[in-house]
Amino acid sequence: MKSIITLGIESSCDETAVAVVRDGREVLSNIINSQIDIHTLYGGVVPEIASRNHINNISNVYKEAIKQSGVSIEEIDVVTCTYGPGLVGALLVGLSYGKALSYAINKPLIGVNHIEGHIASNYITHKDLEPPFICVMMSGGNTQIVHVKDYTKFEVLGKTRDDAIGESFDKIARVIGLGYPGGPKVDKLAQQGEANIKLPKTHFDNMDFSFSGIKTAVINLNHNTIDINKADLCKSFEKTVTEILIVNVKKAIDKTEVGTVVLAGGVSANSYIRKEFLNLEKEGIKIYMPDLKLCTDNAAMIASAGYYNYINGKRNDLSLNAIPNLKLE
């Protein structure tokens, strides 16, 4: 059977990325141009600046991805690009480039849900991974528990009712003076601390999340407690949110009777969260997580998800538009 070579484009936030992937799992190239240094000056992502930089970068990133892949543009079978969720201006840059490329080389176009892409990052890391499984999607914009029934069939079992977990990491980092990006800096400082501060947990009867309470508690402790140990505060925060995640994951396992759990999204790079989830294997739960370089936004995951959509018959035409609040269905 002939291999299918997919080109992926990702521009939903502040990474301009293009990748070439064979058969959904073999990465031939994965080029990422990050804007972290630019947005660090402002303490977070500035949408207008992100969009302008995507425009400046995307052609060069595309050319480098084709060069490193070792394949010619004529050998590309499918063009895939993120069309949501994300920053609308940023999304439109990658989507417009993908539509133009699809038209120019006369190859199918497939729009990919960014969340679906994060899930697919595990297919690249773990060649043996197949659905069904439970995915814990955790990023700056999303916190969800997803029952992945098949490569393109999903059921959201629980989601955050307020802040996403990654958003909470970033806000806490900003308040205690660590700066942007917050997640890696909180993780690093937490490794010097002890989880000795009691923080509130919000639980619901279903598998939804709420992180606004614990975020506010951490901020108040930082403001109102003289000489508080910030490393202990970060470690206590990590421990508490991880316990919240694991409680809901166990609910999902009980409901679906699926004993395989997959981590996805930028927060899945957190060292404490990874360690605690791996400990669940002692209870007979199989844990998968992406390589660290695939946790954050990249185009290989989009190409992988696009491949599975392609072989399942999905096609989009040139009327495809960006949907900044796109849901996983």
Image (cartoon, rainbow, N blue to C red):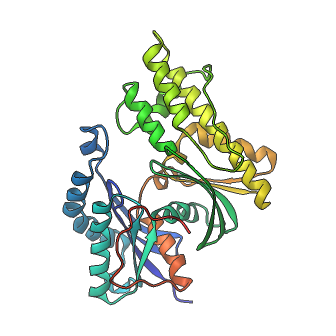
- Does residue 273 appear in this view? yes
Q: Quadrant of the C terminus?
A: bottom right
Can you give x and y, in whole percent of width and height, for residue 73 in the image? 32, 82
Q: Quadrant of residue 50?
A: bottom left
Can you give x and y, in whole percent of width and height, for residue 185 in the image? 43, 33
Does residue 67 appear to the left or right of 313 in the view shown?
Answer: left
Can you give x and y, in whole percent of width and height, for residue 172 in the image? 44, 31
Q: Quadrant of the N terminus?
A: bottom right
Position above or below: 224 against 279: above
Question: How many numbered callouts?
Answer: 0
Does residue 107 appear to the left or right of 139 in the view shown?
Answer: left
- Does residue 258 appear in this view? no
Residue at the image point whose x is 48% and y is 12% from the top? 225
Does residue 78 appear to the left or right of 98 in the view shown?
Answer: right
Q: Which of 36/223 is in front?
A: 223
Q: Which of 124/307 is in front?
A: 307
Q: Quadrant of residue 279?
A: top right
Can you give x and y, in whole percent of width and height, for residue 206 in the image? 70, 50
Residue at the image point whose x is 74% and y is 48% from the top? 250
Residue at the image point whose x is 46% and y is 9% from the top? 226
Position above or below: 48 against 311: above
Position above or below: 65 against 157: below
Q: Which of 219/308 is in front?
A: 219
